Image (cartoon, grey):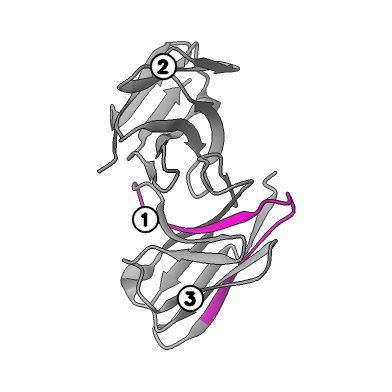
């Protein structure tokens, strides 16, 4: 059982909708991440939150916006998405940022119609 | 630029047939090399961290080794439940870049 919980597991939305993905971890980790994964590809980093500081992959479009209400919660707000944004969105956490030992949630499967 | 390649892209084994997966990397100062297992539609599961050439880690039927240019994930007498995609990743000494390789899809047939 993963200690990183993501909701919802599946989400279908239209291009004009506004929705959010949620992630929670109870391991006391100080860094949390959002990754996007397309079929048969490795995960791609979108955002990192660490010690209340946000780091952004500059290739991520502004229709994705992260929010970190506290150190154990990380949301991803979605607005005006495109069909090519359909993917598995993975949340992860780690004890510190300069490590590759990440703990992933089971992902949220997003379909944009 | 840090790069990670993995081979083969896909591998089919019979149950009990041992083999190895390769991860080759180019990084400006390796801080760590990481192996993950990913089942279809799930998030990756962390397996091992290797820090220096010559280091080895073992877990059940898996053993990971590291040289200055590559890492191997050896699978001994695999079972069907070992079927998954195996990803390797590296971080550099600056700790700023964490790069996943493309993965190897392993299928173990009963």
| Residue lying at 48% horizontally and 75% vertically, measured from the top left | A65
Residue ID for mark 1: A38
Q: Nearer the viewer, mark 2 or mark 1?
A: 2
The secondary structure that most of the magenta stretch takes on is: strand
> Is A45 displayed left or right of A91 in the figure?
left
Above or below, comparing residue A27 to residue B64 in the picture: below
> Is A106 displayed left or right of B11 in the figure?
right
Q: Residue B101 location in percent, x, y?
A: 34, 38
Label drawn at residue B53:
2
- The residue carrying pointer 3 sits among few (fewer than 14), some (14 to 19) or many (20 or more) residues within 10 Å by Cα, namely some
| Residue lying at 65% horizontally and 54% vertically, measured from the top left | A30
Q: Nearer the viewer, mark 3 or mark 2?
A: 2
Q: Are marks 2 and 1 on the same chain?
A: no
Mark closest to the chain's N terminus, 1 or 3: 1
Residue ID for mark 3: A65
Extent of the magenta region: A19-40
| Disc 1 secondary structure class | loop
């Amino acid at each position: 059982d993963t200690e990183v919980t993501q909701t919802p597991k599946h989400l279908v939305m239209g291009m004009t909708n506004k929705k959010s993905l949620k992630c929670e971890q109870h391991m006391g980790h100080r860094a949390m991440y959002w990754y996007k994964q397309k079929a048969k590809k490795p995960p791609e980093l979108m955002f990192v939150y660490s010690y209340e500081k946000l780091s952004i992959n500059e290739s991520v479009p502004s229709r994705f916006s992260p929010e970190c209400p506290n150190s154990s919660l990380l949301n991803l707000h979605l607005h005006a998405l495109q069909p090519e944004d359909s993917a598995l969105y993975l949340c992860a956490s780690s004890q510190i940022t300069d490590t590759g030992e990440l703990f992933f949630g089971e992902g949220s499967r997003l379909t944009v119609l | 630029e840090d790069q990670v390649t993995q081979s083969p892209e896909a591998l089919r084994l019979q149950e009990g047939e041992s083999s190895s997966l390769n991860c080759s990397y180019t990084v400006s100062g390796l801080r760590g090399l990481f192996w993950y297992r990913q089942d279809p539609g799930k998030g990756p599961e962390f397996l091992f961290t290797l820090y220096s050439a010559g280091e080895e880690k073992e877990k059940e039927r898996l053993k990971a080794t590291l040289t200055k240019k590559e890492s191997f994930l050896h699978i001994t007498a695999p079972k069907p439940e070992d079927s998954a995609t195996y990803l390797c990743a590296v971080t550099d000494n600056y700790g700023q870049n964490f790069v996943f390789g493309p993965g190897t899809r392993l299928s173990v047939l009963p």
